[in-house]
Amino acid sequence: MLWILACASKEDLSTSPSNTSENTAQEEKSIAAPLKEEPPQKDTIVVSGFSTPESALYDPHFDRYIVSNINGGPLDKDDNGFLSLVSPEGKVTELSWISGAEHNYDLHAPKGTAIIDKELYVTDIDTIRVFDLDSGDHVRNISIEGAQFLNDLFAAGNTLYCSDMNTGLLYQIQHNSQPTIFYEGLSAPNGISGRGQTLSIVSFKEPLVTRIKMDGSFSEQIPTPSGGLDGIVLTIDGGYLSSWDSSSIYRISPSNELSTFISDVNAPADIGWDSKRNTLLIPLFKKNELLIVSSKDKDR
């Protein structure tokens, strides 16, 4: 087992239109506190062997981590994407658990993941693919007309929210219903998380976290020290953001104060949160690794 952290520069994955909606309201931005440095984290497990890992998700039903592997370009329809299973101790228990190349369904470039009941939802360019959480069998596809770069997913009860980084749209998919546009005009929306009656969406293009109420109205924007934001998770004690531009993980407090939780991490992608152990899951997009990092934060 290795205990390392590394650094590299960011490469843009996509271009996206700038934010165009709610301009007046969005000028009223929350001001983040000056950036603080937290003590270096020592309890870190490094898991290797992945292929362009984009997201990591804690599965509370089977107490394991699910890692999506693009295994190529993020928009390539090459049917060679796969999902891996990892134990909380850092052992890859099944590298190619769900695989497009090995089964009779398509899985091109899997990115964001979410769980509702015993079903796993996975974004795949312009489609959301649904799998049985127990067997890994393919259940169905959810096609989204006009989608270009579906990225992250967040489940609130039986409702899914999905970002499209190219079109600036946030979709809502209610149980057994067709996808609808929930919010538009976001700037390269990437990771999504939520708490209470508010969703938080990070931008890959601008150093901003945008918060939207569950009724679809704008709430606030929080500036961040750097852009290239990829993932976000929220906890009782605040949450975490990943930034490609600064090769860092930021911690955000309940009062929107930002501090550097980890620095010198190479292309930190869509982070996850193990609510049982209070650990942060950080896929390293370019290094083909997963970091499992202990946190002082409480259960989500």
Image (cartoon, rainbow, N blue to C red):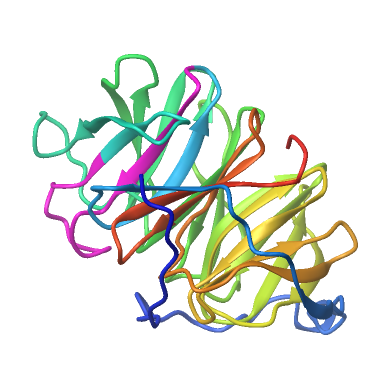
State whether residue 27 is above or below residue 97.
Answer: below
Q: Quadrant of the C terminus?
A: top right
Q: Tell me if 236 is positioned left or right of 122 in this view.
A: right
Q: How many marks?
A: 0
Prevailing secondary structure class for the magenta stretch in the rendered image: loop
In this rendering, position of residue 142 left or right of residue 170 = left
Tell me residue 92's x, y (percent).
30, 33
Provide residue 150's location: percent of width, then percent of height.
41, 56
Q: Is residue 76 left or right of residue 224?
A: left
Task: Tell me if residue 58 comes above or below residue 266 in the rendering.
Answer: above
User: Which of 175 and 42 lies nearest the eye of the viewer?
Assistant: 42
Q: Quadrant of the N terminus?
A: top left
Which of the two residues, 242 or 223, is positioned nearer the viewer here? 242
> Relative to 137, does residue 289 appear above or below in the rendering?
below
Residue 178 can be seen, yes or no: no
Residue 298 visible to an observer of this rendering: yes
Residue 200 as seen in the image, left or right of residue 184: right
The residue shown at (45%, 64%) is: 5
- Please report the residue visible at 21 percent of the width from the left and 65 percent of the height from the top: 73
Q: Per the image, is 201 magenta?
A: no
Outermost residue, right direction?
255
- Decide which of 213, 234 is in the foreground and name it: 234
Q: How far from the left and from the top, in percent, is residue 7?
A: 42, 75
The span picked out in magenta is 62-82
Q: Is residue 285 above or below residue 61?
A: below
User: Where's residue 230, x and y in %?
Assistant: 51, 65
Q: Quadrant of residue 77?
A: bottom left
Q: Going 50% across and 22% down the picture, which residue do you hit?
A: 63
Residue 67, magenta (yes or no): yes
